[in-house]
Image: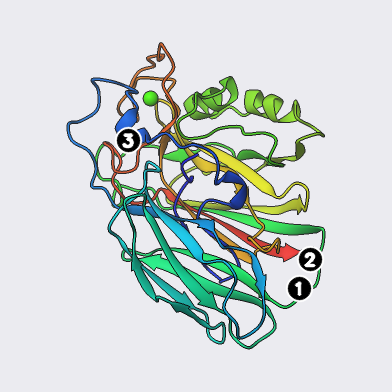
Amino acid sequence: MGDAGGRRASTSVHSHGLPPLLRSIPVIAALAACGGDSGTEPPGEPPRAPAAIVVVSGGGQEGMAGSPLAEPVVVRVDDAGGSPFAGVTVTFSAAAGHGSADPATAATDAAGLARTTWTLGDAAGAQTLTASVAGGVSTDIRAAAGELPSPPDSAVYSVVFNATWSAATHPTDYPGGAHFSPLIGAVHDDGVRFWASGETATPGIESMAETGGTSTLRSEIRAHLPAAVLSVISGPGLGTSPASATVSRVVVRGDYPLVTLVTMIAPSPDWFVGVSALSLMDDLGLWVDELQVTLYPYDSGTDDGTTCTSANADSSPRQPIRSLRGMTPFSDAPIGTFTFTRVGG
Ligand SMILES: [Ca+2]
């Protein structure tokens, strides 16, 4: 999928490009390639900007303290639609005591790739190198100097949904009665996806995005218990926006490290925010301490309405799920954030 929201480090203990398990999934450039709601979108495209940095290779290496890693670190810069971004300067900076990168800056090539060689710092244990571009998009790359202790098999997280959608952040057609439907999702493994940018919505995603109903999506998730799904995540909705809500306990496991979580932007034709198959493990296999995901709006492609209060207009045929970041009535501002904080395990 296109990463469901740009991710930002709140601590250094994670990778926040696409999680490792997602790197091989093809991404449809939703903004450019999808004809969803054709004829109903305003002319022009939103300004193109780097939206994510993906670790292509060289993450999660083990090496000797004070020595260069065997493999170069290669990252790719993508735009919001998942297309590579050429000619962007990437800065590689090691955390304090975690060595240095050579070169420290590199421009992305035609494939959006930039690379560097990371010489580890002298301390034993996990070390962090941050790749960043102007505008605040960054990704952490992790490496181990020497042998790491085994992480616990499970971890417990709290999830805070902080909605910032407002007339100030999204002035066009901001509706009365803005709210968000109950949170619904799953803890799962790499064997299943419940939604992805560029893919057609399931009936469960359609129902969630159009009505806020959770029962169909819950059934789709439960159908994968216990093989691919460890548990269903249920959480509160928001009666207004801006506002925030917390899911106090989400348990992940080494064999089920991924989280999918969604909520309807309401009222709306078929718009939602969320994450799909977000890994709470970093590229060393360690549980992240904290991960904040910036949420941008998605269109589920199941209704042709163009404003929050449009009458129902079922899409036939179904259009792919696509990002509405920067697309009328939404601005380029986020809708909110999910913050995953490790609270135990
Ligand atoms: Ca739509």
Task: Identify the residue under disc 1.
Answer: 148
> Which residue of the protein is positioned furthest toward the top in this rendering?
316
Q: Which amino acid does label 2 sit on?
A: Pro
Q: How crowded is mark 2: few (under 14 residues within 10 Å), some or many (20 or more)?
A: few
* Residue located 67% across and 64% down the image: 284
Q: In which quarter of the image is residue 108?
A: bottom left
- Quote the CA–CA distance across marks 3 and 1: 42 Å
Give the Cα separation between the discs numbered 2 and 3.
39 Å
Residue at x 55% of width, y 32% of height: 195
Between 193 and 240, which is closer to the camera in this rendering?
193
Spot occupied by residue 143 in the image (x, y as percentages of width and height): 62, 71
In this view, 28 is above or below 163: above
| Residue 30 in the image: above or below residue 286 | above
Give the quadrant of residue 321. Answer: top left
As helix, strand or loop, the secondary structure at mark 2 comes to: loop
> For numbered disc 1, what is the local secondary structure?
loop
Q: Which residue is drawn at 57% across and 20% down?
A: 203
Task: In the rendered view, tell whether residue 233 sits above or below residue 8.
Answer: above
Q: Which of marks 3 and 1 is in front?
A: 1
Question: Residue 151's mark?
Answer: 2
In this rendered view, identify the residue nearer to me: 141 or 241: 141
Q: Do the residues labelled 2 and 1 touch (CB within 8 Å)?
A: yes
Query: Earlier along the polypeptide chain: callout 2 or callout 3?
Result: 3
- Residue beneath disc 3: 31
Distance CA(mark 2)–CA(mark 1):
8 Å
Q: Residue 71 carries which label?
A: none
Question: The C terminus appears in which quarter of the rendering?
Answer: bottom right
Q: Can residue 146 be seen in this view?
A: yes
